[in-house]
Image: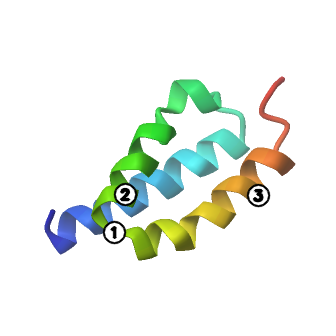
Amino acid sequence: MSERELIKLEATIRTKMEDIRKQRVTLKESGIGGLMNTLKKVDEALYEKIMPEYKKMVTESNIFK
């Protein structure tokens, strides 16, 4: 995966996280899990950076409404 594609993947994940926070989509509908798995395979350091934000979003946001 090129650097450009990696940047695009990170931006997509962050956008989906924001959509989930604002309850535009559910966690399942967003498909973010697959993107996070892809990111882990490609760039584990970036994955480790984003994962705490992801976990915080899941626990703090009332995503089960």
Q: Secondary structure at mark 1?
A: loop
Q: Position of residue 10 (x, y in %)?
A: 40, 62
In this figure, which residue is indicated by the disc labeled 1? Answer: 43
Q: Is residue 65 left or right of residue 50?
A: right
Q: Position of residue 58 (x, y in %)?
A: 74, 46
Picture quarter with the N terminus: bottom left
Q: Secondary structure at mark 2?
A: helix
Q: Residue at x 82, y 44 (%)?
A: 61
Per the model, the C-alpha gap separating discs 3 and 2 is 18 Å
Per the model, the C-alpha gap separating discs 1 and 2 is 6 Å
Residue sitting nearer the eye, 2 or 47: 47
At label 2, which amino acid type do we have? Leu
In this figure, which residue is indicated by the disc labeled 2? Answer: 39
- Badge 1 local density, few (<14 within 10 Å), some, or many (20+)? few
At label 1, which amino acid type do we have? Asp
CB under 8 Å between discs 1 and 2: yes
Residue 34 figure quarter: top left
Q: Is residue 5 left or right of residue 62?
A: left
Q: Residue at x 34, y 50 (%)?
A: 38
User: Which callout, 3 or 1, points at the residue further toward the start of the chain?
Assistant: 1
The mark total stands at: 3
